Amino acid sequence: MSDLKSSPRLNELAIARVLNAAGVKKSRPHIDKSALAGCIDVCADLFNNAKLFRVQTIEKKERSQLQKVHTIALKLKTVLSKTPAAKFAENSDKFETALSDFVVNTERLVKLTWLSTPRTGLEHDYVEGRAYEAHFKSKSPLQWMVGVYLAEVYVLFIGEDLTGTYLDFACQVLKELKIKNGNSNFSRQAVARAARGYNRTRKSAPAIKQDEWTIYRENKFYWVCGVRDTLDLWTELRRREARLIAAEQAANISGRK
């Protein structure tokens, strides 16, 4: 995933419009707006990846490149075996051994898919990259964005489930990010269809399958929120909100004295 931008895509005014659409701008003025903007950035980056891997297969391109490298290495190995004079070059024996290993390893790498079992750490990284690409194909980019990413952010910051103002929240975020259906904004009906299937609430959260991509997203959310030492981001965000409320109340009391 691309690195997060130093400044979020949505500025303070845009976040205010999002919170207003969700109906909490006035009732909950102490929501961590900076953290919310950062989490929406994570969603936008993941949405861009979902679009990329929906229409472009990085694996196919890399496999073709690896096949070319393997073919070149195999040809060089053949040429060396037919050139006895090459053995007089310093370290030629080590090079031939390394080249033979390289030919075998690149041949194996060409055949690896996201379902393969890696044998080395490097192979693990390669297979994981293919798995990251493949997991996007189970949904459309909009389904990922509205049905998963923004839904998780809404539960973290605004509501304990997706009833109420979630569709208003999602539609406004899409509008602010300029994510459109052609030249037009996505209709509320289209957003509602994309949102179906997400039923995560605070009570059901532990039952959600914690696959590696869910954990990957959550780690990104933790990072942009500046949270390192808690197992529950939702609780930490509510604590921040409560601390700000308490500080404001204390200031008001002090001001009246």
Image (cartoon, rainbow, N blue to C red):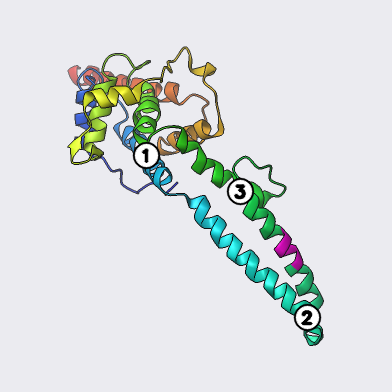
Type of amino acid at the residue the image marks with label 1: Phe
| Residue 29 magenta-highlighted | no
For this view, does 188 lie left or right of residue 89? left
Q: Earlier in the sequence, mark 2 or mark 3?
A: 2
Q: Residue at x 26, y 34 (%)?
A: 174
Whole-angstrom CA distance, mark 3 to mark 1, is 22 Å
Q: Is 2 situated above or below 238? A: below
Q: Which residue is mark 2?
A: 82
Residue 29 seen in the current view: no
Q: CA distance from mark 2 to mark 1?
A: 53 Å
**Residue 190 spot, x, y in % from top left:** 26, 26
- Per the image, label 3 sits on a secondary structure element best described as helix
Mark 1 surroundings: few (<14), some (14-19) or many (≥20) residues within 10 A: many
Q: Is residue 8 visible?
A: yes
- Which residue was labeled with disc 1? 47
Image point (68%, 49%), residue name: 121
